[in-house]
Amino acid sequence: MDRFDAMRAFARVVEAGSFTKAAETLHMSRTSVTQLVQQLETRLRVRLLNRTTRKVSVTRDGEQFYQRVLRLLAELEDAESSLSGAAGLPRGKLRVDVPSPLASLVLVPALPDFHARYPDIQIDMGVSDRIVDIMASTSIAWYVVASCLTNR
């Protein structure tokens, strides 16, 4: 078990309130997230989460651990981004929901150039013709990527 992966999984479960939602945002299976959290609890010899079939809640120990994990993961991210080679380039995950015509005509053809310019950005693209409420959604609107592509 990679402890940082387990801590990330635990933090995401706390934030999402469910293993399924956490797994989706981490791009992992629910089983993998569950196993990481269980291994973390075994290693720490403490229950971090109360689980029922309907909800997940944080225990008192889990809340204290969660606060420390957030600081630790932020420090880790800061340490990684402070390296001289990583300082100027954007990195991370970008979730984009776009209508299918925009994806096929604009974004997909532009992806090779985008990845060449920004190799440390992982794009998670949702293609659908449904209307996305960007104010209620955790995804980033397509125009952010479009502006990145036009501001080369």
Image (cartoon, grey):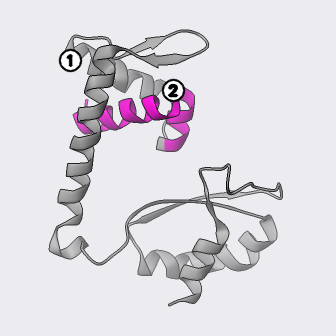
- Looking at the picture, does residue 135 appear above or below residue 116? above
Amino acid at circle 1: Arg
Q: Residue at x 33, y 76 (%)?
A: 89
Q: Can you identify the residue that label 1 sits on?
A: 43
User: Quadrant where the N terminus lies?
Assistant: top left
Question: Magenta stretch containing residue 77, yes or no?
Answer: no
Q: Residue at x 43, y 22 (%)?
A: 34
- Res 95 → quadrant: bottom right
Disc 2 to disc 1, C-alpha distance: 19 Å
Q: Residue at x 31, y 30 (%)?
A: 66
Amino acid at circle 2: Phe
Residue 47 seen in render: yes
Q: Residues within 10 Å of mark 2 (few under 14, many from 20)?
A: many
Total labels: the figure holds 2
Secondary structure, magenta segment, majority class: helix
In the figure, is residue 94 to the left or right of 65? right
- Looking at the picture, does residue 64 appear above or below residue 129? above
- Looking at the picture, does residue 48 appear above or below residue 151? above
Magenta segment boundaries in residue numbering: 1-25
Q: Can you identify the residue that label 2 sits on?
A: 19
Question: Circle 2 sits in a helix, a strand or a loop, which is it?
Answer: helix
In the figure, is residue 141 to the left or right of 7? right
Task: Report x, y in % for residue 52.
Answer: 54, 9
Task: Report x, y in % for residue 108.
Answer: 65, 73
Mark 2 and mark 1 residues within 8 Å of each other at the beta carbon: no
Question: Circle 1 sits in a helix, a strand or a loop, which is it?
Answer: helix
